[in-house]
Image (tube, coloured by chain):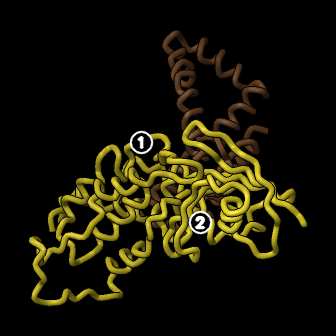
Amino acid sequence: MDFRARSHPSWIGFAVHRVSGLLLALFLPLHFWALGSAIQGEARLDGLLRWTENPLVKAAETALVVLLAAHLAGGLRVMALEFLGWGRAQKDLVALSFGLSLLVGLVFLLNVF
Amino acid sequence: MKQLKVSVWRGEEAGCFARYDVPARDNQTVLDVVTHIQRELDPSLAYRFACRVGMCGSCAMTVNGRARWTCRTHVRKVAGADGALELRPLANLPVIRDLVADLAPFFDKWQRAQGFFKPKDAPNGAVPDEFAVVAPGSEARREADAGIECIGCAVCYASCDVVAWNQDYLGPAALNRAWTLVNDARDGARGERLDAVAGDAGCHSCHSTRSCTERCPKQIDPSGAIAGLKRTLFWDSLFGGKRHG
């Protein structure tokens, strides 16, 4: 793919929205599998939750929170474009959605440590 | 004299780049470069232009990866420090030869999007008895005015990812034209037009990457027009709006 024509904020916003959505969709089966472990007893779920205290898992969880925030903020941006016609403000809205996503990730990290 | 290193697409779809050295000048458009190649270096080069002043849109090509009007693009704004230029025909369209793209699919889609005026007061082509009174400051007229200056150069169409993904997608220019007509109080085909742009190949396929708006040389906002069509169809579908008004 030739990125010379695509190096503008709205396209990058689109790409982040799309990639975050795909990654979240890939995570979803793992999420359901973790919840499903509760069916096999409290101990199994507790064991899994203890494993998530691992710093590496926490780092992955932070990335997941950023992805969720990016996808939510990106979706709100597209809805503002389509329902409110805020086309001219897209550059600012892309920057705002990225900033908010990172902020949410940082707040999550603050709660972790 | 400093030389520009110009790579030009030669042949049809399965062509390749040919390299030309063109003298660099202080004031030089990309169209000047192409003209120099055709007149001085290789008369077999096919390209298209007419007005040379940004009125007709026929000289649009892909310059260093981006669709542009070559007559309004200064070489110094797009060439790298090494004077490299890469010229291809417009993307998303069949290549006739060299730098000439076939715009027939582009204009066919304007027809499919019902991108032509159908007077409400004169459905059979008769001249209306009275002039229509259209308030210039009305919201609908302002929406129509924002998109009416399109000259059909296909820069937006060549820049659109959705056209590349879905060959049937109507594209930004046709949808922009449909939006100007949906907002035209004199037009009598609102319902037919909204039906024409509501299908799989219509406005709902747009992913709002806004490359059309970024690249439009007339600073028109086709992405905003497509959003307007989506919005109109949404509320009309929900509350049964004046589809056939």
Question: Is disc 1 surrounded by few (<14), some (14 to 19) or many (20+) residues within 10 Å?
Answer: few
Q: Which chain is depicted brown?
A: A
| In the image, residue B133 above or below residue A105 | below
Q: Nearer the viewer, mark 2 or mark 1?
A: 2
Sequence-wise, the earlier of marks 2 and 1 is 2
Please give left or right for residue A55 compared with residue A40 in the image. Answer: right
Q: Which chain is depicted yellow?
A: B
Q: Chain of mark 2?
A: B
Position of the N terminus of chain B by quadrant: bottom right
The amino acid pointed to by label 1 is: Gln
Position of the C terminus of chain B by quadrant: bottom left
Which residue was labeled with disc 2? B69
Please give the name of the residue rendered at 37% of the width and 59% of the height, measured from the top-left corner.
Answer: B175
- Taking depth in this image into account, of B93 and A46 the one nearest to the observer is B93
Which residue was labeled with disc 1? B167
The amino acid pointed to by label 2 is: Trp
In the rendered image, which quarter is residue A93 located in?
bottom right
